[in-house]
Image (cartoon, helix red, strand yellow):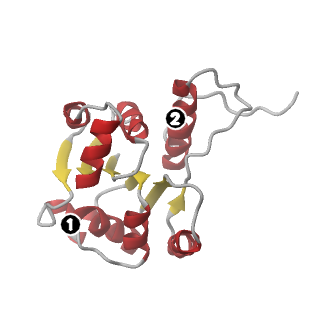
Amino acid sequence: MKIIVAITGASGAVLAERLLENLARHERYVIISNSAGIILELEDIRLERIMELSTKFYRNSEIDSELASSSYSKDIDAMVVIPCSMKTLSAIANGFANNLIVRCAENMLKFNKKLILVPRETPLSLSAIENMLKLRISGAIILPPNIAYYHKPKSLDDMTNFIVGKVLDSLEIEHNLYKKWEGRR
């Protein structure tokens, strides 16, 4: 599977790192925004580590890369924006493709490819909710990093694994990051 993983300037860079670790058997095209570089540093995640986990690495300003082309993107299977800032979510929702992340997301929507957005913001403004609605209508999957307690998390790692597991579920990739709900019996 060929997957674009975009990291934007919202808190939760550990989610992107963990996702990339769990996509090791797949081609991973990673795009990082300028703000994401700051967040990585603030959250003690090394940019070098993200680059190591990438099949190919891009800066958001590389709008002239092959990924920006719809003829190339048609061969990409899915894209995950994790974490997704409200700025990026708004740009995707409104077709403001002035950078590589938004251009790739636009290509995913054009070809009805899987686009998963993990918006990291709370509480949500009305404009954020309206933008999420636009994106959902366009076919994007909106996957807020909401934790659950039924699997009895004991650490931040357990909670991170749950959210990343939900992303992998949406990509239809098998994993064992959390115990799936089996009912009350």
Residue 29 visible here: no
Residue 154 picture location, percent across and down: 63, 20
Q: Along the horizontal axis of the image, is 8 left or right of 119?
A: left
Q: Residue furthest left?
A: 64
Residue at the disc numbered 2: 174
Residue 118 vs 126, above or below: the answer is: above
Residue 2 picture location, percent across and down: 31, 48
Residue 162 picture location, percent across and down: 57, 34
Residue 165 picture location, percent across and down: 54, 37
Residue 140 vs 34, above or below: the answer is: below
Circle nearer the viewer, 2 or 1:
1
Task: Specify the quadrant that holds the C terminus.
Answer: top right
Q: Along the horizontal axis of the image, is 30 left or right of 131?
A: left
Residue 164 vs 79, above or below: the answer is: above
- Callout 2, which amino acid? Glu
> Along the line of sight, which residue is nearer the eye, 119 or 20?
119
Please tell me in which quadrant of the rendered image residue 90 appears. Answer: bottom left
Residue lying at 52% horizontally and 35% vertically, measured from the top left: 174
Disc 2/disc 1 C-alpha distance (Å) = 29 Å
Residue at the disc numbered 1: 68
- Callout 1, which amino acid? Ala
Of the two numbered discs 2 and 1 on the same chain, state the one appearing first in sequence: 1
Task: Specify the quadrant that holds the N terminus.
Answer: top left
Mark drawn on residue 115: none
